[in-house]
Amino acid sequence: MYRIRYHGRGGQGMKTASRILGTAFFLEGFEVQDALRYGAERRGAPIFAYVRASRQPINVRGIIRRPDLVIVADDTLVSIPAAGVLSGLKEWTILLISTTETPDVWKKRLNFSGQVLKLPEVAEVEDRLALRFVGSACTGAAARLVGVISRDSLEEAVREELTYLGEGVIQKNLDKALEAYDLMWDHAGAVREAGEIPADGYEKPEWVELPFEEARISAPAIHGAATSVEVKTGLWRTMRPVIDYGQCNRCWWVCSTFCPDSAISVDEQGTPHIGYKHCKGCMICVAQCPAHAIQIIPEHQAEIAGGQS
Amino acid sequence: MKRALLTGNKAAAWGARLANVDYVPAFPITPQTEIIETIANWIDQDEMDCRMVTLESEHSMLTAAGAAAATGVRVFCATSSQGLLYAMEMLYTVAGWRAPFVLVNVSRGLAAPITLEPDHNDVLAARDSGFLQIHCSACQEVLDSTLIAYRLAEDERVRLPVIVNMDGFYLSFTREPVQIPDTKIVNQFVGEFDPENIRFSASAPVSQAVAVLGGTPYSYFRYETHLAALNGLAVYDEITEEFANTFGRRHDAVEAYRTEDAELVFVMMGSFATKAIDAVDGLREAGWAVGVLRPRLLRPFPADHFRRALAGKRGVAVIDQNLSMGKGGVLHTELASALYASAECSPVVVSFIGGLGGRDISLEEFYEMASVARKAIEEGCAPPPRLLYTREELREVRKLQAIANVEREELGQKK
Amino acid sequence: MSETRFQRRKDLPSTHLLGTGTPMCAGCGGLEAIHQIYDILGEKTVFINAAGCMTMLSVYPFTPFRGSWLYTAMASAPAGAQGVRDGLDVLLHKQRIESEEDLQVVVLTGDGSAYGMGLSATSSAIERGLDFLYICYDNEGYGNTGQQYSAATPHGARTATSKGPRGFPGYKKDLFAIWAAHRPAYVATVVGAEPLDLARKIEKAKSLKGPRLIMALSPCPTGWHYDPGESVAIGKLAVRTGCWPLKEYVDGKVVHTKVPHQRPPIEEYLKRQGRFSHLFQPERNELLLQEIQARVDGYWEGVI
């Protein structure tokens, strides 16, 4: 069985990408199971999708614990623990990453002994959420890497899944998918189907007896105020608003009031400050600032420039 | 202490009054309405310092009950049948809030077809919700169980809402002698409600009943609720021991009548179980070794009590006044699972369904059920479940069907 | 509005009480309104929530509230408010808590609950004279489940369950009129894009007793299909084109707090949102556009 896991952000087309791959396998005569895994998924928030394909009926369900192929559509996700990119990675897993870095850099960074392949799709593009075809490129590459999907089946799958879009859009996606497919020629069949865990050689689950705990502990209640500040919603950002204090009029009642997330605080001098741990990058402040004093820069540039996250 | 003739409804109202409840969200439904009318009257006469509010539905009533309990006050409410089911979403919800309060359910058969008369399908539908359940067979028991229920619900080892169930009409509207205990003694027994840290107040902000994501935290919260419900077994025994010492009346988790040397035991819940007591006396006189077990606690399920009481018995006749469509009697199913693979306890278990929609169960029927069970013991296997229903009754229904113009080919009753 | 402390926008709160880090969509117009409202209502509140987008405000163990919160069910948040209010009243009456411990009870629901499933509970709570606030964040559809149409969806809008060429065939229910017909203490419409108007109304609602109901238009980037940064611009357009009247019901009368003069054509508002794109592409649906404009014009003719 092929076990493939996609990682992306809400809005990057992971659902469609995984379904194109699922359909491609299906057209090749495989039994298929594909799904998107929802959390509180929001635009920009990490999500994942998975595809299983086998010649036999598929009985397993749910999350893929030991993927044969991990596809990362947005390399900024690797450093976010909640995205779970590295979960279950084994030496035989192929890591396919859409990135500007080289595979060796990733191998070192992740201390990973398996194979890392890159999609050169990403030029120095600004907004990661603007990469509308990254999903198709990922799937095109994956189709070649598993070695059992023909170019024709890939094309048919793209057309089938995107049938509701205009021909122009379909063609663009197709071009990207086939380009990536061809690029992976040297690695055709690199993805291997790992076997199942044997019944006479498994790691024992550590079951515990759940102890009774009084309702003061075991009721679903939060005894505290504003614990939500622990959640770094800033990780959703692909673009960042930055205040140019040279232009800023200190009319904090505009930006600070309009930020829905209460992420713009005001100091004693009346100067607004954007809290990057939580700013989701909606850009309402940019649109509403009367002095046009707030600029938009890509998040990865801000990191390079030493910005706070 | 005074002894008076009270209906089951009035007994329940007295239970709430003696427990000094703070808040009664209400909604009328036959056959419980007398409970809220009685309480409303006492409030109007300044005999109860309690707030009563009529909500617009039972779903809202249960929401208000749980919310008030989660705020930190002692709550009482009552419903029945369709109302209990209308509130079903909230039964699960408020149990998960760990908001303790008492709900009196006056058992009534469920639509469709709609009826006003009693059976147990309504309260049994709630058995998975997290509410504990106490089943009464006499009006005295209704009053007593309400007091016990507050102690049980509010105990820190439990902290779950409790249903006290009585049968419609046979208890709700029937007067029996009831000892109304002394207020001071009851106050000592029930005590004051300590909400601990599940409450609302400005100085202690709390977000209650929040959402969870993921099976891991969800499983934790749900299983803890289950463990708390299971604690109810030991806590119930403690409380009823204290109750017996204080008030002189014993209300065991499973009441046993003449079972010590019995070979065959009837098992049934609710008010008709007292009819079984009479049947046992009659059978004993005719030489049978027979007894009755009446579970008062249904949730948590008193499995150990049953296993102890039925050890060495040769046969059990379970009489269910309920029907799980496509499976059969609920009490039968639950008892059979409790007895499974127990070496000391492997009687033949026979299933009878009777009393649906208040249908009477006659003394003769009890005697005949004993015969069937005895035959099952001798043969070593149980016959298929039997619905208690006579030829006379079927004839009666046929007459009704004829009027309703229902085609009956075999009786040639075409119009 | 001479008695208000919100004379100018400088008077708006500069500290924000609602915690950051909630999982609401970037640019959420509902969160926009709630974060402004919470600044004025403060921490001595208990929010009683019905199922909807804002269910996700508090996911164990995270909560943005500095006050309290109780999540109930979709149909019964007002009944939950009844229970909490009555519970607090009993505790105060029986002197089991000090008066400083009292809380304002605030119901929070989306339009799905307010316009539909929860209407019965709301109606009865008002009728019982419950002392509570009701905040409805109206994003004109069942948002949390993927923006299916609700009783609050405007005529012609595309939703997940109205994807035909003419969009939603129904008409937005007039919930303001339904609430006002109960003669509660106060009803008002607000939008986060007009923070001064919102602040004055919340301040007024806070000062009154009895049932007080607020309807907040909540532009929704995810459901209405526009770029999140546009949420305030679209909210402002809703007011300027006359599509979202800013008004109050108080002392038996309806008063408009803003009367837009020289209203831009409604299509200025519609064309910014993907949910109305079928009115413009592949060709303009002149008939539907005129119908929508006529309804807006008709409303204001009745007012002025």
Image: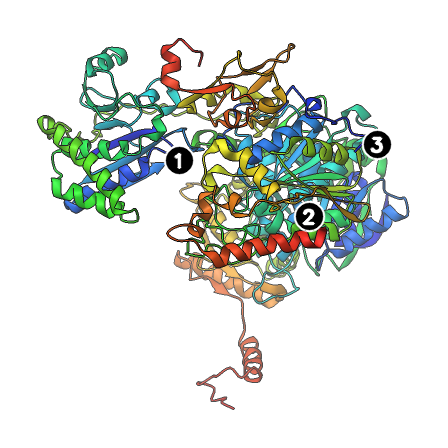
Q: Image quadrant of residue A119?
A: top left
* Protein chain holding label 3: C
Q: Residue furthest front?
A: C262
Decide: is A204 above or below C33: above
**Mark 3–mark 1 CB contact (< 8 Å):** no
Q: Is residue A255 left or right of residue A116?
A: right
Q: Looking at the image, is mark 2 or mark 3 nearer the viewer?
A: 2
Q: CA distance from mark 3 to mark 1?
A: 48 Å
Q: Is residue C148 left or right of residue B355?
A: left
Q: Looking at the image, is mark 3 or mark 1 nearer the viewer?
A: 1
* Protein chain holding label 2: C
Residue C122 marker: 2
Question: Looking at this view, is C61 or B323 the one in front?
Answer: C61
- Give the x, y percent position of residue C282: 37, 52
Q: Which residue is mark 1?
A: A38
Question: Looking at this view, is A241 or B355 the one in front?
Answer: A241
The reply to whether label 3 and label 1 mark residues of one chain is no
Residue C94 marker: 3
Q: Amino acid at mark 1?
A: Tyr
Q: Amino acid at mark 3?
A: Lys
Q: CA distance from mark 2 to mark 1?
A: 33 Å
Residue C137 in sight in this render: no
* Label 2 crowd (10 A; few <14 / some 14-19 / many >=20): many
Total of numbered circles in the picture?
Answer: 3
Residue that appears at 64% across and 34% down: C194
* Label 1 crowd (10 A; few <14 / some 14-19 / many >=20): few
The reply to whether label 2 and label 1 mark residues of one chain is no
Q: Amino acid at mark 2?
A: Thr
* Protein chain holding label 1: A
- Give the x, y percent position of residue B117: 65, 64
- Give the x, y percent position of residue B388: 53, 67
